[in-house]
Amino acid sequence: MERMTGTVVRGIRTPIINCGDDLIQIVSDSIIKASQIEGFPIRDRDIAAITESVVARAQGNYADIDAIAADVRSKFGDVTLGVVFPILSRNRFAVCLRGIARGVKKMVLMLSYPSDEVGNHLVDIDALDEKGINPWTDVLTLKQFRELFGNIRHTFTGIDYIDYYTSLTEESGVECEVVFSNNPKTILEYTKHVLVCDIHTRARTKRILKANGGEVIYGLDDILTAPVNGSGYNEEYGLLGSNKATDDTVKLFPRDCMQLVAKIQDHLKQRTGKTVEVMVYGDGAFKDPVGKIWELADPVVSPGYTSGLKGTPNEVKLKYLADNDFKDLRGEELKKAISDYIRNKKDESGGDMASQGTTPRRLTDLIGSLCDLTSGSGDKGTPLVYIQGYFDNFSAV
């Protein structure tokens, strides 16, 4: 019978995962049970992907605001601290901010505008144009920002993040001064002690600050890289990738993910005889057209994956072949010609005209985005995603 489907993605329900649970067993059991109930076979080169959130949960990788405060205090001392380029998020940064505030004498909070790096807007860019403001050169105080733009609430959350972050800081008895700038050097006019909070541009921000007179410069990725009073930690990413667990606690990005995925792959091989690729995934990369957020609040899309997920896709564009190389063919003759072309394509076809227009991204970033959209971040109850046919192409039968 002719094959009529390509990639199939399934959200797999698992038990609610708690601290100390055996993820290797849970993932394997859930996939095998789903295959039996839903009637799909487990094949070589299928992909099992588990969200970073439940990995960290099983690890018990949590920290409270007192641990954050203690680490901030140990690195900076009792100073006026510049906190630069945080993202605007109740889930991602608010609890971290409460902990940071507890560890300092005064805070200067420098926000990028019109949006943070993942797309959350403080002000619409058209409003900047109307007021003649250049976000790349103009530095605004809080008073100037309010006079120009008033009190603006986030499109979806309804939060005024300026007031929200200020109030979280002041609840700890710490004065908070707010400034708006996209130039890292601006903060050095207020303090030489700076906590860099941007995610994907953090290395550049640190370099600029250190080269221009910054005295003590750390990033969120340097906070809680080791346990503090028994807290969780992440030696590579620190507080980056953390999420709100309670009002006083964050769940950190998971540790040791490469070891975990290798063990899950081995366990599935023992039980099924098949080599299933395995990855841990976090935020994908896709832009909301209304809220304008890009996701991407984790430091990487996948902190751990098996070797079969390395690299980028090796694909050709079917419509290019149909419009060019085989433009005079139709029906079965066209199908056979394209299938033969795909079977004989080079391992690296990136320079060929037929490959132009295919997505030049890493497999883990593409698959992680697919998984993030499938599982969501709400109540679907499918922290495990099972993908079949991802590596197949038009020539597969």
Image (cartoon, rainbow, N blue to C red):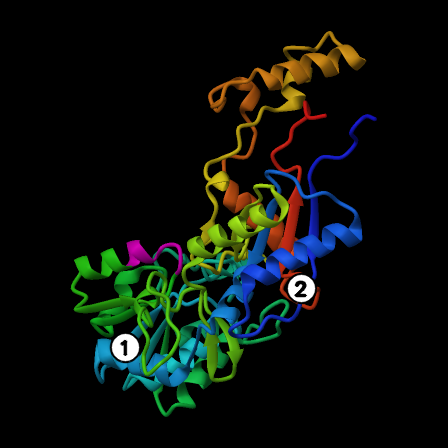
Quadrant (top left/top right/bottom left/bottom right) for the C terminus: top right
Q: Position of residue 183 (x, y in %)?
A: 32, 59
Q: Which quadrant of the figure contains the N terminus? A: top right
Q: Residues within 10 Å of mark 2 (few under 14, many from 20)?
A: some
At which x and y percent is residue 211? 17, 57
Q: Residue at x 67, y 64 (%)?
A: 14
Residue 86 left/right relative to 227: right
Q: From where the camera sits, is residue 254 visible?
A: yes
User: Where 133 falls versus 331 (above or below)?
Assistant: below
Residue 201 among magenta residues? yes
Residue positioned most to the top: 328
Q: Nearer the viewer, residue 331 or 9?
A: 9
Q: Which residue is mark 1?
A: 81
**Bounds of the magenta segment:** 199-205
Residue at (49% x, 22% y) in the render: 347
Q: Look at mark 2 in the image and give the residue it sits on.
A: 14
- Callout 2 touching callout 1 (CB < 8 Å): no
Give above or below for 99 relative to 375.
below
The location of residue 201, given as percent across then percent down, is: 36, 55
The local secondary structure at tag 1 comes to strand
Residue 189 shown left or right of residue 115 in the figure: left
Q: Nearer the viewer, residue 245 or 15?
A: 15
**Residue 282 placement (x, y as % from top left):** 52, 57
* Residue 291 in view: no
As shown in the figure, which amino acid type bears the numbered disc 2? Thr
Dot 1 amino acid type: Leu
Work out how far the residue at label 2 is from the one at label 1, CA to CA, in angstroms: 43 Å
State yes or no: residue 221 in magenta: no
